[in-house]
Image (cartoon, rainbow, N blue to C red):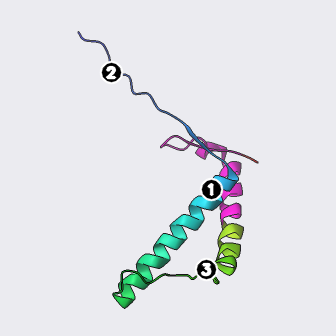
């Protein structure tokens, strides 16, 4: 018999700031994709620089709520894909 194969899982730790920044990036990417799909123009943006502060205010508030929920859910930390949500 051969040696058993061992799967090594790695854990990635994510802080609240990293979580918020990731949420910002995801929403901006989604908005750009949506608006570009509607207009057919590949350089059209879903938000302008002037609109970003208002957009980030909402994203940041919601992302902090989601992060707090994940921190409180001990069964999810680490997640099945190895994500460790860090309490700030």
Q: In the rendered structure, does residue 73 fall within the stretch colored magenta?
A: yes
Q: Nearer the observer, disc 3 or disc 1? A: 3
- Figure quadrant of residue 34: bottom left
Mark 2, Cα crowd under 10 Å, few <14 / some 14-19 / many 20+, is few
As displayed, is residue 18 above or below residue 54? above
Q: Nearer the observer, disc 2 or disc 3? A: 3
As displayed, is residue 55 above or below residue 74? below
What SS does tag 1 mark?
A: helix
Mark 2 / mark 1, whichever is N-terminal: 2
Q: How many marks?
A: 3
Q: Nearer the viewer, residue 73 or 11?
A: 11
What is the span of residues highlighted in magenta in the rendered image? Answer: 63-86
Residue 54 is labelled as none
Mark 3, Cα crowd under 10 Å, few <14 / some 14-19 / many 20+, is few
Q: In the rendered structure, does residue 3 fall within the stretch colored magenta?
A: no
Mark 3 / mark 1, whichever is N-terminal: 1
Q: Position of residue 26 (x, y in %)?
A: 52, 66
Mark 2 to mark 3: distance in Å? 51 Å
**Residue wearing tag 1:** 19
| Residue under the image location 33 percent in, 87 percent down | 40
| Residue under the image location 68 percent in, 55 percent down | 17
**Residue wearing tag 2:** 5
Extreme residue in the left direction:
1
Q: Position of residue 83 (x, y in %)?
A: 55, 44
**Residue wearing tag 3:** 49
| Residue under the image location 47 percent in, 73 percent down | 30
- Figure quadrant of residue 19: bottom right
């Amino acid at each position: 018999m051969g040696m058993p194969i061992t799967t090594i899982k790695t854990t990635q730790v994510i802080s609240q700031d990293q979580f918020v920044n990731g949420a910002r990036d995801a929403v901006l990417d989604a908005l750009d994709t949506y608006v570009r799909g509607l207009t057919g123009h590949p350089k059209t943006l879903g938000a302008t620089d002037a609109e970003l502060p208002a957009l980030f205010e909402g994203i940041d508030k919601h992302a902090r709520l989601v992060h707090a929920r994940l921190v409180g859910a001990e069964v999810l930390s680490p997640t099945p894909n190895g994500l460790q949500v860090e309490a700030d």
